Amino acid sequence: MEDNKTIYCVDDNRANLMLLEKSLKDYDTISIQSGIDCLKELEKKLPDLILLDVMMPEMDGLETCKKIRATPQWRDIPVIFLSAKFTLQDKLKGYAAGGDDYLGKPFNLEELKAKISATLQRKQQLDQSRDEVKQAQDSTMEMISNIGETGIVVNFLQNVLNCRSYQALAQTVIQAMQNLGLNIVMEIHYDDKWNQFSTTTTENPFEQSVFEFVRQKGRLVSFGERTAVNYQYINIIIRNMPTHDEAMCGRIRDHIALIGKGANAKISAIHKDAQTKEKFSMLVDFMGDLKNILNNLDETYEQHQIFMESIMAKVADELEESFMQLGLSDYQEEEQRKIIARAESKTIEQNDKFSKIHHQFSSMNRQVDTVLEHTINAMLEDEEELQKVELEENISLF
């Protein structure tokens, strides 16, 4: 038998059936004596080809073929009509009923074998073409699905750039996962601890111990219908991986790895931003302290000036008064005045030097004022921008 090809031979004439069985020994032939019985046999087993007599009682070959073509699971079986009526009009009726070929009786055995071989070959080519079309359709649908899924990931990567808080980032991850049809639980590390978020409001305490396990098991960990993706600052467990669809499962793994990587990078950026703000705040505090010190120096300088001037004036007055009591000569009095004058000159010289230093400190004080003002304004602007972004995020979530 040729590749175990099965042929239904349908004819109400037993002699014709015996002739076909004898002539087609290269095939597995099954003899059937009516159109109704042919349909019953088709419900049990599908042949590779049907040789169908046209003129039969109860249900002729044309009606039988029409019923075969009307049944989805039978419609692709090749049918060759065998009939004593083979005018052009008869052949057109056979073609209209769904026949693949038409051969008149009495038939030439070699012609029949040639038609059977050609019809089976066409059927094989048609099946192959259908398989290729089906594969192309499946590939196209997979590509369309992948494009849609990729769009969700791209949209997430765009949205995550605007997240300024851990809570907003968690909601963005959850939204992307829900758009992919995934049920997840995840933990994000901040404030020196792991904080859990989920697509459902119900928390499973057992999952906490699962997180502790999967953190040590590499980037991607699969167990049953669950898959975990692990990064430095975020761990995600997918609760409903599509394990029934290997291709989709592979795509989802790629998507969640990208989402996890993007989220981890943003968490790291939020960490660094918080550290920068902390250092910024420390700098503002330091500059405030420095300004207070400079203000104190300014006040101390002014008090020093007043004090030195009053001391020198008092010394000069007391010296003049002492001249009357000491009984000094004019020369001695003049020498004392010169001593006082030199001391006063030295004091003024030192005051001038101190005045230059004071001027530098005053200039520094004004610069500190300017920097401090700009720094505080920058902090306020960042705070306003953060509130604006968080407001927009909250609106988008609804």
Image (spheres, rainbow, N blue to C red):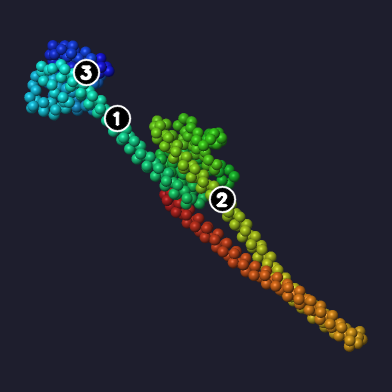
Residue at point 15%, 12% (across, down): 19
State if disc 3 and disc 2 touch (CB < 8 Å). Answer: no
Local crowd at mark 3 within 10 Å, few (<14), some, or many (≥20)? many
**Image position, residue 186 (x, y; %):** 50, 40
Residue 227 appearing in the image: yes
Identify whether 339 is placed above or below 141: below
Residue 199 appearing in the image: no
Q: Looking at the image, is mark 2 or mark 3 nearer the viewer? A: 3
With 157 as the anchor, is 72 left or right in this view?
left
Give SS at disc 1.
helix
With 320 as the anchor, is 159 left or right in this view?
left
**Image position, residue 94 (x, y; %):** 13, 26
State the quadrant of the N terminus: top left
Q: Looking at the image, is mark 1 or mark 2 nearer the viewer? A: 1
User: Mark 1 highlights which residue?
Assistant: 131
Residue at point 18%, 13% (across, down): 23
Q: Amino acid at mark 1?
A: Asp
Q: Amino acid at mark 3?
A: Ile
First in sequence, mark 1 or 3: give its number.
Answer: 3
| Front residue of 87 and 310 | 87
**Image position, residue 107 (x, y; %):** 12, 17
Residue at point 33%, 38% (across, down): 140
First in sequence, mark 2 or 3: give its number.
Answer: 3
Which mark, residue 7? 3
| Front residue of 389 and 42 | 42
First in sequence, mark 1 or 2: give its number.
Answer: 1
Residue at point 18%, 22% (across, down): 115
Distance between the alpha carbons at the discs numbered 2 and 3: 76 Å
Q: Amino acid at mark 2?
A: Lys
User: Mark 2 highlights which residue?
Assistant: 272
